[in-house]
Image (tube, grey):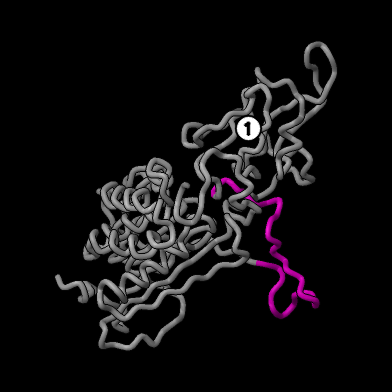
Amino acid sequence: MNRNVLPVTNENGYFEIRLESIGGLGANLCGKMLGELGALSLSLNSLSFSSYGSEKRGSPVKAYIRWCAEDKPLRINSPVTHPHILGIFHEGLIGTHPVLEGVSTGTKIILNTPYTADAAAEKYGISIGELYCLDALSIAMECKSRVNMVMLGAIAKASGFIPADVVEQLCRDTVGQKYPALIEANLSGLREGYARAEKATVEQNLTPPPAGKRESYIWGYKNAPIGGVNPRAGSTVSNDLSPSREGYIPLFIQDRCINCGLCDSACPDMVFQFAPGIYKDKECMVNKGLDYFHCKGCLRCVAVCPTEALVKALEKDHPDKPYFLPNQDLVPDTIPYQKTGANSWITSDSYMDEKRVDGGVV
């Protein structure tokens, strides 16, 4: 087909894409690149914009893209509610945010998950549309690229009409100009995303998914306290920061621990849980484990541990983390943890061997 002919459009003549993500995975840049792809490579009228809050890792992010024929004006700039392509950059958003709203039988859904496409369809009740799945985080780690580049390749494949060579050239012209040393890693991520996106084979297009759970707040614009109070602070105790980790965790090996407390001193989020106990026949404060709900994976603790009681490990290899102990100082007995939430991670906080920038791993 001609590159400037869209396979399907809505009642307004638009082809629409929505990306659901969290801060740190690059959905904003991916949306911008898709906008440029439509205008510069596919000879379409194109519009792209994003919606996000605190600009912190873990915060929910949405990106919207609209394409239409070059002889048709783009007169709508509202959010995309019924996408032809839906990219979900983190599976933790399903169930906590209404990311599946607006999907239909013709929607191509691309989901970043370690599950197979058939298993993901069953686990998350995705019974409508065409589902494509891939473990974009693992691929990005293998290629030393970014999740957004892997997802861009998968989106091109799922679309059925975006040529792979056009996406590669776009990558060279955008990311390649800013980070020329990382272009091959990003191209590798694109190619692997295109090649490894797997389509579900289970019967789809049965019934629309149930309406997603919407967050409700006590305060609104009518009754919020005067004075600019923000009821949703950047980081809260109920945030589960695990979605914003980049594939690594500090793994605790208690037999090696000498209870020196250096890990607790180095940790920016105080995730280590010490309690009175016995070590070498003496009473002392003993390290009981980590609160992985609030660990953002900076690995400072690994860097300072003198006995290698904390080591760098791939999170996917430890789905049931040993010595996972929620913070014992929290007042409530139970907290409904929010799967995504803002955290204070910045690249310079990381003690990982990998030094990451927007374009990938330096």
Q: Residue at x 40, y 51 (%)?
A: 182
Span colored in magenta? 217-243
The quarter holding residue 227 reads bottom right
Q: What percent of the width, then of the height, locates residue 89? A: 44, 55
Q: Nearer the viewer, residue 167 or 272?
A: 167
The kind of secondary structure the magenta stretch mainly shows is loop
Q: What percent of the width, then of the height, locates residue 189? A: 35, 49
Badge count: 1
The quarter holding residue 281 reads top right
Is residue 215 depicted above or below 302 in this figure? Answer: below
Q: Is any part of residue 344 visible from this angle?
A: yes
In the image, taking residue 22 as reference, residue 195 lies left or right, namely left
Q: Nearer the viewer, residue 185 or 132?
A: 185
In the image, taking residue 211 as reference, residue 245 lies left or right, namely right
Q: Residue at x 65, y 50 (%)?
A: 336
Q: Residue at x 68, y 24 (%)?
A: 306
- Was residue 277 drawn as part of the magenta stretch in this picture? no
Mark 1 neighbour density, 10 Å: few (under 14) some (14–19) many (20 or more): many
Dot 1: element: helix
Q: What percent of the width, then of the height, locates residue 62? A: 49, 66
Q: What percent of the width, then of the height, locates residue 9? A: 27, 77
Q: Residue at x 29, y 65 (%)?
A: 105
Is residue 211 depicted above or below 5 in this figure? Answer: above
Q: Residue furthest left?
A: 1
In the image, taking residue 214 as reference, residue 84 lies left or right, namely left
The quarter holding residue 257 reads top right
Is residue 104 depicted above or below 184 in this figure? Answer: below
Point out the image quarter for the N terminus.
bottom left
- Badge 1 is on which residue? 302
Q: Nearer the viewer, residue 163 or 98?
A: 163
What amino acid does circle 1 point to? Val
